[in-house]
Amino acid sequence: MAADFDTRVRGLADDRREALVRWRRDLHRHPELGFEEHRTAAIVESHLRELDLEVHTGIAGTGLIGVLRPAGSDEPAVLLRADMDALPIQEVSGRDYGSTIEGRMHACGHDGHTAMLLGAAEVLCEMRDALSRPVVFCFQPAEEGLGGGRRMVEEGVLDIVPVGAVYGLHLWSLEPAGRILVRPGAFMAAVDSFQARIVGRGGHGALPHESRDPIVAAAQCVTALQTIVSRTIDPVQPAVVTVGELHAGTATNIIPDDARMTGTLRSFDDRVRQTLRTRVRELLEATAAGAGCRAEVTIHEGYPAVINSTEAARIAREAATMTVGEDSVSEPPPIAASEDFSYFLRERPGAFLFLGAGNEELGITAPHHSPEFDIDESVLPRGSEMLARLALHAECPR
Ligand SMILES: [Zn+2]
Ligand SMILES: [Zn+2]
C-alpha cells in the first residue's frame, strides 16, 4: 500500500499544479484580515463541498473544517491545518496577481497555505482507499496576532471528529524553494508583552526633593529588567527581555507625573516563560517603590511556544524525505518568531514545519511581513504532497 501511495501521491499533487497557482493567486488578489475571511472561507467551503466532504463552518467565526472519513475506520483523525488571514500591509505595485485591496496583503504566505491544503484534500479524496484514519482539513482564521488557533481549539475543533495528531506547514521565503525544515522539541518562541506606568509626583526640575521622579525610577527599572535573563534564567535556556518603548516628560525643567514603558518577552520553555512574567512584575514594582514611585504593570499573554513532539517530528521528517529528498530536509535551530499553531500542539501531539519558498534567481528573497514578500509558486504541489503524506503516515495515539 505504502509504495503505491508514494508514486500516486506525487502524480496527483503535480496534476494540480495549475489549479494551485490559480487558487493562490485568486486569494492573493483578495486578502482578508483576521476574522474577516468571509470570501476566503466561502471559496474553501465550496471546494470542500464539491469534494463531498463533511463540512463544519463557523468555528472561531470564519474558520471551518472538512472531514474525509475512510470507510470503516474508527481510528482517531489526523488534523492538517492552514491559516487564511492576510496582513494590513500595502503590497508593492506591478504584480498582475497583486492585492486588489488597498492596505491589505497576503504577506505571510497564508494564501499559499490555503491553496496547498485544498490541493491535499483533492489528492486524499482520490486516495481514500489508502487512508486508515479520518483526515480533518482545518482552515483557521486570524493567525496574525488575534489567536484564531486558540479560539478554534477552545470551540472544540479537536473533538468534532476525535483528533489524534496535528500537523501544520508554513511557507518560508528565507529558505530556498523546496527545502523542508523540521525539528523535534521547541521550534518557535512563546511571546508575551508588558506595559508599565511608573507613577511619581511631578514638580519643578530645580526642586527634586518636592517630587517623586518617575524618570529616575524608570531608568532604574530598565536596568533592573536586564538582570532577569542574566541572573534568574538558566544560562542554557534561551530568553529575551527587551524594553521597546520608554516615554516621559515634556520640558527640561519639569519633573513629570509618570513614565511609560513597554517591552516584549520571548522564551521556549513554560517555566522560563512564567519566570519572565513574574520577575518583570516583581522587579518593576519593587524598583519603582525603591525610588519612591509606584508601578502599574500589565502583562499581555501572547502565543505559547511551538513544541513539536519527537515522534511526530520523526514522521514529518520521513514524509519530507519522500517529498523532497533527504538532501533537502534539515533540522533548523529554534527561531524567536511565534505561531498560534502552538495551541493545537498543546492539546495533541504533532509537528509544525517550514517549506522553503524563496528563489534568488527569481528575486524572491523578501522576508515575511514585507511589502515585497512573495513565494516561488513551484513549491505549491510539494506542499500539497507533503500534507497528503503526513495524513497517510501520521500515527495517532489513542
Ligand atoms: Zn505572519
Ligand atoms: Zn504566517
Image: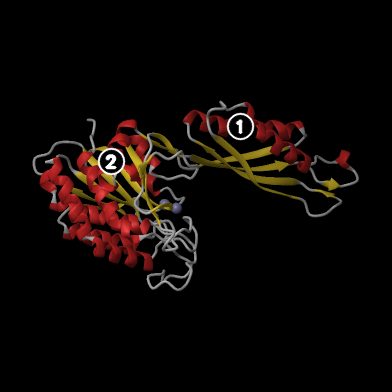
Determine the secondary structure under disc 1.
Answer: helix
Q: Earlier in the sequence, mark 2 or mark 1?
A: 2
Q: Is residue 370 left or right of residue 212?
A: left
Indicate if the residue with disc 1 has its beta carbon within 8 Å of ligand 1: no
Tell me if residue 249 comes above or below residue 104 in the rendering: above
Crowding near the residue tagged with mark 2, few <14, some 14–19, many ≥20 C-alpha atoms within 10 Å: many
Please name the residue that numbered disc 1 is placed on: 229
Amino acid type for the residue under numbered disc 2:
Leu
Determine the secondary structure under disc 2.
Answer: loop
- The quadrant of the image that shows the N terminus is top left
Amino acid type for the residue under numbered disc 1:
Val
Residue 131 visible in this rendered orientation of the protein: no
Pinpoint residue 132: horizontal percent, then vertical percent. 14, 39
Which residue is found at the position 17% from the left and 53% from the top?
Answer: 53
Out of 93 and 39, give the one closest to the viewer: 93
Residue 8 visible in this rendered orientation of the protein: yes
Out of 177 and 141, give the one closest to the viewer: 177
Pinpoint residue 326: horizontal percent, then vertical percent. 31, 42
Out of 219 and 203, give the one closest to the viewer: 219
Pinpoint residue 249: horizontal percent, then vertical percent. 77, 51
Report how far apart the C-alphas of labels 2 and 1 lie in the structure. Answer: 36 Å
Which residue is found at the position 84% from the left and 46% from the top?
Answer: 203
Indicate if the residue with disc 2 has its beta carbon within 8 Å of ligand 2: no
Please name the residue that numbered disc 2 is placed on: 158
- The quadrant of the image that shows the C terminus is top left
Pinpoint residue 58: horizontal percent, then vertical percent. 30, 53
Q: Nearer the viewer, mark 2 or mark 1?
A: 1
Q: Is residue 69 left or right of residue 93?
A: left
* Residue 32 in which image quadrant: bottom left
Which residue is found at the position 49% from the left and 43% from the top?
Answer: 302
* Residue 40 in which image quadrant: bottom left
